[in-house]
Each structure stands twice: as structure tokens, then as C-alpha cells.
Image (tube, rainbow, N blue to C red):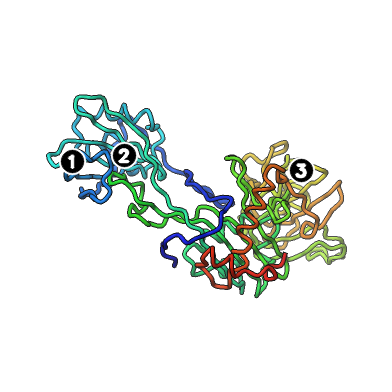
């Protein structure tokens, strides 16, 4: 496990992530937050009350400079809670609450407060309320100052987040997940790695013992906060509390069956994308495979003995064996041609894509909601679930790809790229390549803490193939 360390000298880098609500996510995984209403009628609120604590005096914020020994109390809304109930639990006088809520309302949407929302109140030693703060998101909170005889004033306060560049590497024996196992961020990095390389590396069949994985990423930890910082869910509130992975900055996979390197390039505040060293986007028109599968039972061939009819016939597709009910996703953006019974294919979905491509997904147990003829689907959108309908001996997906109505091998065709790098961002890619290539090269199997400056000095350009 890595521990926070003082920042080391490092080269100028083209991008250092800024904290954003919601962070990154992984492919095919979704997160939702419960919204809470301000209005009453919610029943008994579920409040997580934190005991009053003495505020640290080493860096007292301006809000409490008037108080010699301010006291800070905290509470969380919790599921089913409301701001009214939270303010009551903090013993805010009833006559102050309307003006406090009015001030908060200019910065906070009361209808969409998550259950993790926290509050804090600062009091003088005599018990007078100096300020009330509400934290509706991890990255910021809103502080309301109560001036004697004046109107409460609200201001947004950003939570300080420290960003560190870290590295990890591993050698594959069975899988990428196993290669990174034991590292603090192994689970998150495995999902992000799969998302980045899903168009070039099939992590279910391509890995071979001896393949090498390298990752450079930005991690986040809590910086030195002001004493009235409210809680947010169960996240740590102490300086240095680890907050997880913010962004993979660069990564590489060197294998016997597949090899690829990716660099993150920001796009003028419009997000960004991953590109190889030549500027080709890693995101391709088609996924390497449309599901998580166990093995391939039949590949693309012109001569295969059918397991049921026993006749030798062409098998112009790939059979992916997977448990019944495994989600199947669209390999690319397109429009559904048909979704229904399709003879020997059983339940099947046919999709038309751009540039003459079509894909077919057969033997499905059922279809996803909304998948029907004429429906528009996006890459990675679930379209159905693995089954054994039609002429099948067991649960699997029969996957066919057509180009101008001619079957092609989906495992070996030239996958067209999408979203080419704009010329205005060529310099950004070059900066990323120069900054992170030496760091990638310096990572050795099992490394999890490589100083950026040292990595730049010890890298060898012959160690990273392509």
C-alpha cells in the first residue's frame, strides 16, 4: 500500500487532473446518488450525528477569528433526512433557520441533495452561532456567515484536493487483474485499464504469461481543510485522507498477442481521449468483443463440422461461450435492423452501422428493454442476454460481422478509428508522450512507487516495444 509522500521534483507535464464531481467511471458500470427533498412529510429523518469537537487553532479560518475557542458540531442528512431535521439536530434556533435556508438556497438545490450531504455549525464559547455550512458534494461546501443584526451571507468554499502522480506495473501470469493484485488501487485500475484498451486488447483471450502491464495515474487525497469542513458520506476528513484514482495518464500493454500504448490528451475543457504515440485514438469503431466471455468455442472458418447437423459448412462468425444471462452489448453505434426470432440463430439482433458494416448477435435468451427494429443504439449499450435459443448446444453468443454484406472475421479485421486527434492538440499529445514515456519505461514488474524525476533519468527507450 502506498502512503502519501512529499511531492518530488518532476518535469513539466501537459495535464494534471482537477477534482470533478462524480470522478471517472468504468465501462458498463453505473453509479447513482439518492436525491433528498427539503419539504416535510419524509417521516422520521435518519441523522448521523457527529459529536462536537474543538476546532484546530493552527490554521483557524477567517470565519472563526472572532471566537477565541470556537466549537464545531457536525451532522449528516442520511437517507430520508432533510435540512430542517439536520438543523434541528444541530440545535440551530428555529428563528435563524429561515434566513440560513434562504442563504443556502442561492447555492444549493434542495431537491437534489444526496444522502451523503453533511452540515457543520461553528459556535462561540458562549454558544452563539457564528456560521453554518452545508456540503452537497465532495469537492465543495457552502458556508453561511451570520453577522449580528445583519442578513446571513453565503459563499462557496472549495475543498482542497491534492493530486499525486503514481505508477504501478506487473507481469501477467493469468490476468491483468492478477498482475496488479496487491496494489492499493488494483480494482479501480483494472477496470480503467480494461476501458482504455477494450478496442485493442481482449483481456479475456489475449493475455499470455509474461505479458507486461504499466500504468501511470493521478491519485487524489484530501488537502489541509478549514476547521468548519462538513462531512460528506463516510469519506475521511483528515488531511491526507486517500480519495482514490482520478485519471490514468498513460498506460501500456506489451503482450505476445496484443500490444498498445495510450496517452491521455485533454480537449479544451470538453473532456479528452486516449491516443497512441502517433495520434491515433484508441477508441475504435467496434469493440474487440461484445461481452465478457469464458472462452471461444468456434472461430471464423470456411469449414466447420456443425455440432448438431454434423455437416461440414462455413462458420462465418465467432461463438463466445458465457453463462446464460450474461449481458451482450452493441459493438458499435448503429440502428437496429431487426430484433426477434431469426431461424437457427434463435433470438437475434441485427444492427446496421456506418460505412457498410453490420453485426449479428444470435442465440440470445432475451432482449434488453427498448431494443427493437429501428431503435438507435450506442457502443457498449446492452442489447440482450446470452442464451441457447435456436440451434445451439449450450449458452453462447454467435457473433457475425458483415462488410458490404460479406462476412469478415471480427477478431482480425482492420478496426477503423474514430474521433481523430485535432491538429490543434498535436502539441498536447507530444507533451504527454515526452512526459510519460520515460515514466512508463522505468516501471519494473511489481513497481508501485516510482519517483517521476528518477524515472525520467533511468528510462531506456529500447524497453518498450511499440
User: Label 3, label 2: how many angstroms apart (C-alpha)?
Assistant: 48 Å
Do the numbered discs 3 and 1 sit on residues whose CB atoms are within 8 Å? no
Do the numbered discs 3 and 2 sit on residues whose CB atoms are within 8 Å? no
Of helix, strand and loop, which one carries label 2?
A: loop
Of helix, strand and loop, which one carries label 1?
A: loop
Residue 72 percent coordinates (x, y): 22, 45
Image-based side of 145 in relation to 265, left or right = left
Q: Which residue position is annotated with label 2?
A: 81
Do the numbered discs 1 and 2 sit on residues whose CB atoms are within 8 Å? no
Of helix, strand and loop, which one carries label 3?
A: loop
Q: Is residue 150 above or below residue 297?
A: above
Residue 370 percent coordinates (x, y): 63, 39
Give the quadrant of residue 1: bottom left
Q: Quadrant of the C terminus?
A: bottom right
Determine the residue located farthest toward the left in the rendered image: 126
Residue 367 percent coordinates (x, y): 65, 46
Image-based side of 251 in relation to 113, left or right = right
Answer few, some or many: residues within 10 Å of disc 3's Cα (few below 14, many 20 plus, some between 14 and 19): many
Name which of mark 1 and mark 2 comes first in the sequence. 1
- Give the residue displayed 69% in from the left and 47% down from the top: 426
Name which of mark 3 and mark 2 comes first in the sequence. 2
User: Label 1, label 2: how many angstroms apart (C-alpha)?
Assistant: 31 Å
Front-most of residues 331 and 303: 331
Image-based side of 167 in relation to 207, left or right = left
Single out the mark in the foreground, 1 or 2: 1
Answer few, some or many: residues within 10 Å of disc 1's Cα (few below 14, many 20 plus, some between 14 and 19): some
Name which of mark 3 and mark 1 comes first in the sequence. 1
Q: Which residue position is annotated with label 1?
A: 67
- Give the residue displayed 57% in from the left and 40% down from the top: 269
Front-most of residues 434 and 466: 434
- The mark found on residue 353 in the picture is 3
- Give the residue displayed 42% in from the left and 55% down from the top: 221
Amino acid at each position: 500500500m502506498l502512503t502519501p509522500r512529499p511531492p518530488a521534483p518532476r518535469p513539466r507535464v501537459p495535464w494534471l487532473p482537477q477534482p470533478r464531481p462524480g470522478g471517472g467511471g468504468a465501462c458498463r458500470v453505473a453509479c447513482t446518488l439518492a436525491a433528498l427533498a427539503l419539504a416535510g412529510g419524509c417521516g422520521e429523518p435518519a441523522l448521523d450525528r457527529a459529536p462536537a469537537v474543538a476546532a484546530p487553532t493552527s490554521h483557524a479560518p477567517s470565519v472563526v477569528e472572532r471566537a477565541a475557542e470556537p466549537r464545531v458540531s457536525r451532522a449528516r442528512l442520511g437517507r430520508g433526512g432533510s435540512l430542517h431535521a439536520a438543523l434541528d439536530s444541530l440545535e440551530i434556533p428555529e428563528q435563524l433557520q429561515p434566513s440560513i435556508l434562504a442563504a443556502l438556497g442561492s447555492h444549493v438545490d434542495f431537491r437534489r441533495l444526496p444522502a451523503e450531504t453533511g452540515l457543520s455549525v461553528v459556535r462561540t464559547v458562549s454558544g452563539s452561532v457564528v456560521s453554518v455550512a452545508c456540503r452537497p458534494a465532495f469537492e465543495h461546501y457552502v458556508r453561511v456567515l451570520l453577522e449580528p443584526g445583519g442578513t446571513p451571507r453565503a459563499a462557496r468554499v472549495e475543498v482542497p484536493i491534492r493530486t499525486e502522480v503514481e505508477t504501478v506495473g506487473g507481469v501477467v501470469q493469468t490476468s491483468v487483474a492478477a498482475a496488479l493484485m496487491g496494489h492499493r488501487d488494483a480494482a479501480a485500475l483494472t477496470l480503467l485499464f480494461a476501458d482504455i484498451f477494450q478496442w485493442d486488447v481482449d483481456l479475456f483471450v489475449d493475455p499470455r504469461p509474461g505479458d507486461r502491464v504499466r500504468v501511470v495515474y493521478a491519485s487524489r487525497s484530501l488537502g489541509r481543510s478549514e476547521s468548519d469542513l462538513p462531512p460528506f458520506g463516510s469519506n475521511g476528513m483528515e488531511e491526507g485522507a486517500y480519495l482514490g484514482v482520478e485519471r490514468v495518464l498513460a498506460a501500456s500493454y506489451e503482450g505476445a498477442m496484443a500490444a498498445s500504448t495510450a496517452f491521455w490528451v485533454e480537449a479544451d475543457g470538453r473532456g479528452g481521449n486516449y491516443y497512441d504515440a502517433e495520434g491515433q485514438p484508441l477508441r475504435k469503431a467496434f469493440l474487440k468483443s461484445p461481452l465478457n466471455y469464458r472462452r471461444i468455442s468456434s472461430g471464423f472458418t470456411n469449414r466447420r463440422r456443425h455440432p448438431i447437423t454434423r455437416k461440414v459448412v462455413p462458420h462465418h462468425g465467432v461463438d463466445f461461450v458465457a453463462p446464460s444471462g450474461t449481458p451482450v452489448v452493441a459493438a458499435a453505434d448503429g440502428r437496429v435492423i431487426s430484433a426477434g426470432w431469426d431461424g437457427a440463430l434463435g433470438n437475434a439482433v441485427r444492427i446496421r452501422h456506418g460505412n457498410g458494416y453490420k453485426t449479428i448477435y444470435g442465440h440470445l435468451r432475451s432482449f434488453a428493454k427498448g431494443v427493437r427494429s429501428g431503435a438507435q443504439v450506442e457502443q457498449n449499450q446492452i442489447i440482450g442476454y446470452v442464451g441457447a435459443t435456436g440451434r445451439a448446444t449450450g449458452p453462447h453468443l454467435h457473433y457475425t460481422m458483415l462488410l458490404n454484406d460479406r462476412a469478415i472475421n471480427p477478431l482480425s479485421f482492420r478496426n477503423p478509428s474514430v474521433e481523430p486527434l485535432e491538429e490543434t492538440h498535436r502539441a498536447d499529445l507530444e507533451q504527454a508522450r515526452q512526459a510519460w514515456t520515460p515514466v512508463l519505461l522505468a516501471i519494473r514488474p511489481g513497481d508501485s512507487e516510482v519517483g517521476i524525476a528518477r524515472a525520467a533519468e533511468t528510462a531506456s527507450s529500447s524497453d518498450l516495444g511499440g
